[in-house]
Amino acid sequence: MTPQDSGSRYARPVPTIGDTSSASQRREDPAGWAMGEAVTETLARVVAGRRDIRRYRPDPVPEELLGAVLEAGHRAPSVGHSQPWRFIVVTDPGTRDRAAAMADRARLDQAAHLASERAARMLDLKLEGLREAPVGVVVACDRRTPATGVLGRATFPDADTWSCATAIENMWLTARAHGLGMGWVTLFDPDELADLLGLPEGVVTLGWMCLGWPDERPPSPGLERAAWSRKAPLSDVVIRERWPADESAPQQPVSHLRGPEASRLVGATDSADELLSPPESLGVLDRALNRVLALGGEDLAGGTLVLAGADHPVTGLGVSAFPGSTTADVLAATVAGTSLGAATAKGAGLSAVGVDAGVAQPVPGARDARPAGERGDVASSDAMTAADVGTLLEAGREIGDEAALRGSGSAGLVCLGEVGVGNTTVAAALACALLDLEPQDAVGLGAGSDADMVARKRDVVAAALARTKGETDPLRLLAAVGGPEIALLTGVTLGAAGAGAPVVLDGLAASLPGLVAARLEPGVQGHLLAGHVSRERAHSLVLRELGLEPLLSLRMRAGEGVGACLAASLVLQGLAVRRTTARTR
C-alpha cells in the first residue's frame, strides 16, 4: 500500500520566490487576491478624481514626487513586456516656450476647421499649462523594433503605443493621488515636437504632459464644465458579445468639422460682382469658384490627383468586359505618369499620386494601402472587413491631408480618381444602398457591357441589397457592398476637407466617397465640387443628393479622375480670370 493509499499527507513545498499560493487556497477563496474595501474605495476616488489640469502654480515639484510619477508610468503593462515608453522630462523654460508656441499655432489651425461656435469654445480653453507647469513630460514610444519581433505586436502592430497610453494613465492617477495636477496636450504637429526634442526616426510622441501643483481644483471634467460635451452613460458604451446590428448600436463620436463660413461665401460673391462682367457670367463655374474662394483659395494654383486602384472578387460573377490585369496596368501607368488620368492631371498642372488599395498583384511604386482581411464578392459576402474599412479610412485621411498641402500658397485642389475592373457594379450597389434605389435605377453599362452583362450586374446588385436590407450606417454599407478604393478615397475626402482643401469628385465610383464622407461629417459637403456627370445611371442621383451641379457633362466613361482633372483645370483658369479681370467701382 502506498502512502497516498493510506491517507498520508505531506507539507506542500512553498516556493521562496514567485506565487506562494496553492491551488486549494485559490479554489477555496477566489477573491483572496483583493486588497480590501479601503483600498478599492480609495482607488475609485482617485479614478473619479482624475482631471485634465490647465492651470498651475509655479512651485517646484519635489524630485521624489516626480520619481514616483515616472515609476508609476514605468510599472504600466506593455505588449510583450517590451516597455516601449520613453519619458523626456523638460524643465527648461526656453523649450517650454517653444512648445507652447507650437501648440498655439496648432490650436488656431484646428479651430479654423471647426464650426464657428465650437471654434470659439475651443479657443476659450486654456493652454497656458505648457508655460506655467514647472515640469513637462513628453511620453514617447520607441517603435524602432519591428512589430514581428515583439510578442503580441505581429497581429496588433500599434499595441506598443497603447502600452504607452497605459503608462500615461498610471502617471495621471499617481499624480492625482499625491495632489499634483497633470494635463495631456496633443495640439502639436508630431514631427515638429519630435524635432524640438531631437527624437530619432522611429521614436514617436504621444503628446506633452504638464505636471505641477494645480492652480485649480475642478470638481468635474473641464470639458463638461465648458459645456463641450457630457459624459455618456456607461450603458451607452457597453456592448455584450458582439456589435449589435440594430438601432441600439452606439453612435459614432460627434465631429464639428465645418464647411465654408457664410461671410466668406458672401464675400466671394461680392467680389465677383465687382468684375467688369455680368453677375454669374461663368454660370456653374462661378459658383464653384465662390466655394473655392470661401475656403481660402485666393492664391490656389495647383493640386493633386489621388488615383486609387483595387481589384474586386465580383468580377468572378461575369460583370466586367475587361480582364482583371487592366487595373494593375492602369495603376502602373499612373505611377509612371502615363495613364490617361495622370496625363490629364499633368495637363491641368496637377501632380498625381497612385495608391494601391488592393490590386491583385502589388504595383511597384504605388503607395501601399492594401487591405489585409478577407474580400467578398458583394452578392454573397461582404466586400471588406470592418477593420479594413477603418484602416483604409485612416490611410486615406493621411493621404488627403498631404495632398491638400501640395497646392501653392494655400490648400490645393484634391481630385479623386479610381481604377478597378468591376467597380461600376460595386459602385451601383453602394449607391442603391445609400440612396434606397432599385437596381434598375442604378446599374449602367460600365465600360463595354452588353445586355446580358447588364442583367448579371443587376442580379448581383439585387443580391447585395437583399443582404443589407434595412442597414443605414454608411461605414457598414461600405464594408458590405463597397470597394477598397472607395473606402480609401472617402478617407482622402475627409483628410483633405479637414485640411481646408476643395475636393473635386469624378465619376460614380469617385463621387460616392464624397457622399459617404458627408454622411459621416456633414461639413464636408461644403468642400466638394462635382467635376462632371458621367453616363452611369446613379451618378446624377448621387450628385443630386449632395446638392452639387457638375461642371462638365461630356458623357465620359474614363474614370481615373479624368473628369475631375479637366474640371480642376477649369477651376484654376477661373481663379486666374477672377484675379486678372478688370473691376468696376
Image (cartoon, rainbow, N blue to C red):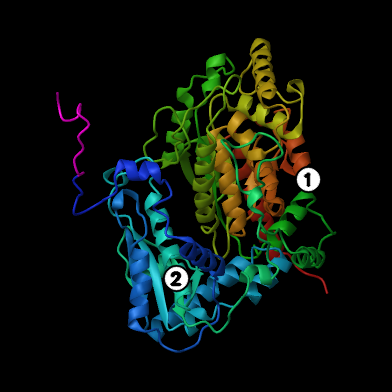
Instruction: Estimate the x, y position of residue 164 in percent, counting from the top left.
Output: 39, 59
* On screen, residue 110 above or below 403: below
User: Is 509 or 532 nearer to us in this picture?
Assistant: 509
Badge number at residue 208: 2
Q: Element type at marker 1?
A: loop
Give the residue displayed 83% in from the left and 74% down from the top: 585
- Give whichever of discs 1 and 2 has the lower sequence position: 2
Q: What residue is pinned by disc 1? A: 547
Residue 460 appears in view: yes
Q: Magenta residues: mostly which secondary structure? A: loop
400 sits left or right of 359 in the view = right
Q: Residue furthest right?
A: 278
Q: Nearer the viewer, mark 1 or mark 2?
A: 2
Q: On the rendered structure, is 373 left or right of 8?
A: right
The residue that appears at 74% across and 66% down in the rendered structure is 264
Q: Is residue 331 above or below residue 61?
A: above
Q: Which residues make up the magenta segment?
A: 1-12
Q: In 3D space, how far apart are the residues under numbered discs 1 and 2 (Cα atoms)? A: 42 Å
Amino acid type assigned to the residue bearing label 2 in the image: Trp
